Image: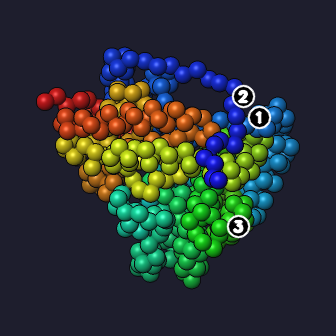
Amino acid sequence: MKLPYAEPYRIKMVEPIFQSTIEQRKAWIKEADYNLFNLKSDQVYIDLLTDSGTGAMSDRQWAEIMLGDESYAGSRSFLKLDKAVKDITGYKYFIPTHQGRAAENVLFSATVKEGDIIPGNSHFDTTKGHIEFRKGKAVDCTIAEAFDTDLYHPFKGNIDLDKLKKVLSENPIEKIPFIIITVTCNTAGGQPVSMENIKAVSALCKSYNVPVYFDAARYAENCYFIKVREEAYKDVSIKDIAKEMFSYGDGMTMSSKKDGLVNMGGIIALNDEPTYRTAITFNIMYEGFITYGGMSGRDMGALAVGLYEALDYDYLASRVTQVQYLGEKMAEFGVPVQKPIGGHAVYLDANKFVPTIPKEEYRAQSLAIELYIVAGIRGVEIGTILADRDPETRENRYPELELVRLAIPRRTYTHNHMEYIAAALHEIYISRHEAKNGYNILWEAPIMRHFTVKLEKIQS
Ligand SMILES: *Cc1c(COP(=O)(O)O)cnc(C)c1O
């Protein structure tokens, strides 16, 4: 008999969350200029804004907090983390940073120059931001299948080898400091990259002498998908899959706020000594000394434990199963969601959900606002507002996918919360034809505007 899945942990501490009324939420979101980032957390019932730094730590991680060694240089907590990172990635050098984008800032300061080209699979927004800020160009080489939300493909995060080859062969190699493989691919819907693809990309890049870096925020979830979807790996442990995956690259940056199972932290790990030498100087300037890089000793200890917990098969199975349960429940109700369901989030396809709203009025943002008003659930737009304007023409860039991401924090919400979320979306879906008007931008920042944009509702 196959028993149903259940979480491989129980709850030792609870945090109350507040339920509000629709009237309250209508007033709050208006006060927040219709930007969900401006809401107070107490104005939100279920917070699916991000799975970044919002998960629950284990009792073992909390124990490490008490063991934290806060020495400026060479602390025990750093040494624990250093050992864990090198053991898991196999890379020679490790640099701690305060979060993922800081790792990008430090590594890219050492490697990216004006006019450089960095191919990859749908670069994450801060990754692209750090490239464009240095007047470099991020070229998206994701496979075309990733942009068809109805199509099943087990590895929609894969890189299109022909697209990549074109970029590598048509540009001077000294203009391509490295390529980035994002595992899992957040921007394409939390979709994994297969080991076969990683291997092929690595071989292609080697033939051009271009290094491969991983954006490894959700590498453990990616390894889980490799185990369950790639026949050759079904009997390989997650840790060994991770080791093999990293062996095809030259280094990685990571936001520890995802698969590090901690609330704050970042990692750079790499093999090339000259790059490491250059990067540590930037680390000292931007982050802190090389044995803490913006992290407390106690947080480094908790991360050292979290990295291993995230590689536990039962943990990963319960995590991915929870996300899939939510996605499949919504799909049953007819709600258009990105398929297959990704590892950390369910993505609503706003172009299919609310085609009645003009795309110039930000469909995905409009849907995210409606979900907040109806149910107190906070998701996030992954669409036109996030895509920013073209740096040259200053026109809106309309991405192929207009999504609302519902990111599920790790080890945080229960099965009943998933039922509540699915029911709320079902209700909105039933009355979707009534949605006619979206929003106008009142104010926006020149880069990464989604965090601070101010909007107004368009009245009919
Ligand atoms: C979160 C994330 C980052 C940035 O990390 P922060 O810790 O938020 O600075 C970079 N890449 C990916 C894929 C991410 O998910």
Instruction: Give the camera-side residue of 24 and 204.
Output: 24
Residue 265 x/y as whole percent = 66, 43
Find disc 3 in the rendering and name its residue. 236
Quarter of the figure that contains the C terminus: top left
Distance, label 1 to label 3, CA atoms, is 28 Å
Residue 381 x/y as whole percent = 38, 42
| Cβ–Cβ under 8 Å for marks 1 and 3 | no
Which disc number belongs to residue 31?
A: none
> Of the residues shown, which amino acid type is indicated by label 2?
Lys
Instruction: Give the camera-side residue of 126 and 358.
Output: 358
> Does any portion of residue 155 appear in the rendered image?
yes
Which disc number belongs to residue 12?
A: 2
Question: Around disc 1, counting alpha carbons within 10 Å, would you say few (fewer than 14), some (14 to 19), or many (20 or more)?
Answer: few
Indicate which disc, 1 or 2, sits on the residue closer to the N terminus. Answer: 2
Find disc 1 in the rendering and name its residue. 59
Indicate which disc, 2 or 3, sits on the residue closer to the N terminus. Answer: 2
> Of the residues shown, which amino acid type is indicated by label 1?
Asp
Q: Residue at x 50, y 49 (%)?
A: 324
| Mark 2 Cβ inside 8 Å of ligand 1 | no
